[in-house]
Image (tube, rainbow, N blue to C red):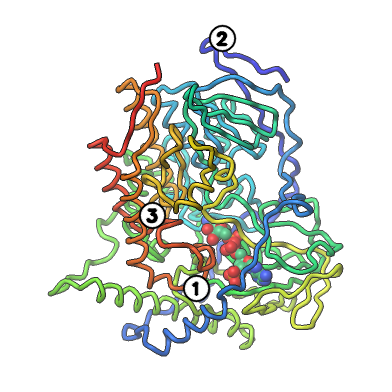
Amino acid sequence: MPIKVDPETGLKIFNTRAEKANDKITGKGYSVVTDEALTTLAEEKAGDVFNADEQARYLEFKKSRTGVAEYIGMDGKFSKYLNDVHSQPPVPRDSLDDECEILIIGAGFAGLMLWYKLSQAGYKDVRFCEKGGDVGGTWYWNRYPGIACDVESYSYLPLLEEMGYIPTMKFASGFEIMEHCQNIAKKTGFYDKCLFHTTVEETEWDEAAGRWIVNTDRGDKMKAKFLVVANGILTTPKLAKIDGMEDFKGDAFHTSRWDYNVDISGKRVGIIGTGATAVQIIPEISKTVKELFVFQRTPSSIDVRDQRETTPEEYATWPNEEDWAKKRRARFAKISSGRTALSGNDDYLSGKISDAKPKKKHANPLSPEELQQKQLDTNFRIMEVIRARVDAIVEDPKTAAALKPYYNYGCKRPTFHDEYLPTFNKPNVHLVDTAPKGVERITEKGVVHDGVEYPLDVLVYATGFQWMATSTFDMIKGRDGRTLKQTWDQDGTKTWLGLQTKGFPNMFVITGPQGGGGSFNFTDTINDHGEYVQWMLDTMAEKGADVVDITEESQVEYAEHCAEADSATQALRDCISYYDNEGTAKPGQLVYYGGGRWHKYRIKGQESLEPYVFDAKS
Ligand code: NAP
């Protein structure tokens, strides 16, 4: 397909969005559960503390998990699991060998939010490359039955006010979120800017030209002055490494490529993994399959969700408040450390009352040690009520025992569901406890564990994604020819605010390692990062600078701060999980737990401009 040119701007118009592949999608989001016994938690016991016995129990659990996790990437014979089952084949188009000002990888929330900001600010020569056939990112790839957001949708969905939209449910279904993304793209002209089904395979900084050279799997060899990596932090799916995987003769897929062409109704289905994804899938598919076998290694914490529809009053009144969504998100951020966000008071979030709960006053301020102990005790009490919930709902004592998590709250991504636990009371649902090592073997017929073979028609891998390690990091080559991954592996992860790394001029990573994941709501982080990128572009234009890099001192100082902040709160996350790369990550290497201090560093840098080395090419 020849690419059209806009006569007004002289810029190319792409619109290579691919058609949807099928309409067989079932199980759209959650049912509203009205049984109060399932939507409320028992009160925490005020006096309970995280004592030595309980600490020993958590430690035992941690030890049993250490070193057991083995994953493999989806290459070679497993690359079929990465195929895009969601849309028609790529729209044919000419390869490009031209130049643009800003090239952005990714058309998920980050890409859409960046485009909105940049286009409002007058940046026109912006181009996106997206691996999928449409916008949505996470919500493009993940279309499994039961999918919904876990952060309340009124605070999580981007650009609500700007698009004049209010989600229909407190926890909107993934399909609604995907449609919202499509609406943003339609209303803002995003589709014209995006090369879909286009995977960036290699980008290299050309020092002489002061440009990034961007090569894609569609034969493009484009130049860009600025490169923005906005393709997410849980993007690359992974498979558990299990003997015999390639022998299985039935249908098999990863949750991020749910194949609706495989009819699961009346079938024997197995699912490996019980993370946040599986917790949403299991209740939904238990309604259609004949038998469901859940292969669990570590149970998730299953908190209350209390899903509800948006009320007519909310639809009518919220838009009357100027900046309602922005203000709500700010209020949400104030209470969103840990589970408070989920039990967040609606009156507070909608601005009807000014405080979420009365603030306690301490006669003497707590020392950091006392504060941490207090947090550990609170954390323990939350886990106690979560464990009590399992006993209250799950009828079979052996199944209930296996479903109870023994680790600090937040070690495994907290989940929220009111149908998950009751699902295990159904006669067609079987929990297979594979702790501590995980599933033993896969055969051509199904899954084997503890010497028992479970024959299956369909096997679902709910085995997650690589955290903070998109494959893109391994294909971006900077000034010294090393990739971003090599640089971080060899020198230690060092960045300025997570956004910039020395030797990678004019490049920004959105929500990457050290990127200030202090917020529970990634939409906030994306917003902050987008504002930063725009500030940098504006600043460079004002200064007449063509190239920006950062100083070694600034990234060393910031990386040390990340490590310190991470170590200081390590006791709260003393466990094995993908968040700490199964216990192998160095402090501050991945997500950054410093909360508000990210902003302090940002403001200091923006005011002094000390972290930056600006250069004019011409
Ligand atoms: P995940 O949390 O990484 O879960 C992978 C699961 O596979 C774990 O339960 C893991 O057990 C299990 N597993 C791995 N190898 C195994 C083996 N050999 N045998 C048995 N089990 C094995 O992945 P996910 O559930 O896809 O979730 C990923 C992330 O996506 C979430 O944490 C969350 O951030 C995001 N998410 C968000 C939402 C939302 O609504 N916002 C919804 C879904 C997902 P172990 O725990 O023992 O390793």
| Amino acid on which disc 2 is placed | Pro
Question: Where is mark 3, residue-wise?
Answer: 519
Q: Give 454 or 348, whichever is nearer the viewer.
A: 454
| Location of residue 393 (image quadrant) | bottom right
The residue positioned 35% from the left and 43% from the top of the image is 552
- Assess disc 3: are there few (<14), some (14-19) or many (≥20) residues with their C-alpha within 10 Å of its C-alpha: some
The residue positioned 32% from the left and 46% from the top of the image is 327
For the question of whether residue 263 can be seen, the reply is yes
Residue 388 horizontal/vertical position (percent):
49, 82
Q: Give 298 or 401, whichever is nearer the viewer.
A: 298
Q: Name the quarter where the N terminus is drawn.
A: top right
| Of pointers 1 and 2, the one earlier in the residue sequence | 2
| Badge 3 vs badge 1, beta-carbon distance below 8 Å | no
Question: Where is mark 1, residue-wise?
Answer: 36
Residue 72 horizontal/vertical position (percent):
68, 59
| Amino acid on which disc 3 is placed | Ser
Task: Name the outermost residue toward the bottom.
Answer: 53
